[in-house]
Amino acid sequence: MNIITSKSNNVIKNAKKLHQKKYRTDSYLIEGWHLFEEAVENQAEIRQVFVLEAYLDRVENIQNVTVVTSEILSLLADSKTPQGIVAEILLEQPVLPYQLQGRYLYLEDVQDPGNVGTMIRTADAAGFDGVMLSKASADLYSLKTLRSMQGSHFHLPIWKLDREELFERASQSNLAVLATTLSEASIDYRQLPQIDQLILVMGNEGKGISPEMATRADQLVHITMPGRAESLNVAVAAGILMFYLRNF
């Protein structure tokens, strides 16, 4: 059995490049057993697997397995305590249908990978039908985002589109655009009429939604806070709103 021990090995060097967005043209890395098992269960195309020798029996039915040392695995992983496996997965980009039906989440320029991943995971848990990301939002396939999503990107479609296309698709599909912001024109989310065809928009952590979004959205909504905190974390706010809207 050959075990890769060198950082200068070309296979390792090429895999490590996938930490950078510019190299993720058709594949990306995942780490940890939960994400790996999600990939297998959801029939994602696994390009190659890097694993410690102690865990070889857990990947015996997988092709293109490379055994590496713990030092090399730490080089490929992003977490401080890697779980023993890193895998390269084919990057599949779903086509956005012309006609949409259901409930969707749109993230407008959300910067933090943890927030993006958490909101996608929450949309999955709340039974939303898909997630849309603005092009300025955090990278969907960074290891930090993937770790926060916990495999939810295997469960529901995720698309990238700008604001103009968002409004075009919403109009074509008769979806109400609900944007979160605190202003005189916004209402408490509990005052919303029953809506089951919608796009919920969550804005940037510091700036909130864009002025264009605030002007063109069908309804502005906010979460009334009886306490003294000035604001909620965007992912927490998204969770409150998604589960409320899902129960309409």
Image (tube, rainbow, N blue to C red):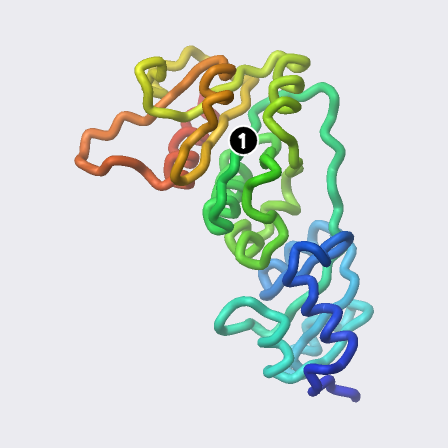
Q: Secondary structure at mark 1?
A: strand
The C terminus lies in which quarter of the figure?
Answer: top left
Q: Is residue 197 left or right of residue 203?
A: right
Task: Please indicate whether residue 128 sits to the left or right of residue 205 in the image.
Answer: right
In the rendered image, residue 52, in percent from the top left (x then y), is placed at 65, 80
Q: Residue furthest right?
A: 63
Residue 195 visible, this orientation: no
Q: Which residue is mark 1?
A: 105
x, y (%) of residue 31?
61, 64
Q: Is residue 181 visible?
A: yes
What percent of the width, then of the height, locates residue 151?
60, 51
Please say if 108 is above or below 37. Answer: above
Which of the two residues, 44 or 4, is positioned nearer the viewer here?
Answer: 4
Tell me which residue sits at (70%, 73%) in the image. Answer: 50
Residue at 41% in and 40% down: 205
Q: Amino acid at mark 1?
A: Leu
Compare residues 84 and 27 and report the one nearer the observer: 27
Residue 75, relative to residue 46: is it above or below?
A: below
Neighbor class of circle 1 (other Cα within 10 Å; few <14, some 14-19, many 20+) is many
In the image, 187 versus 24, the foreground residue is 24
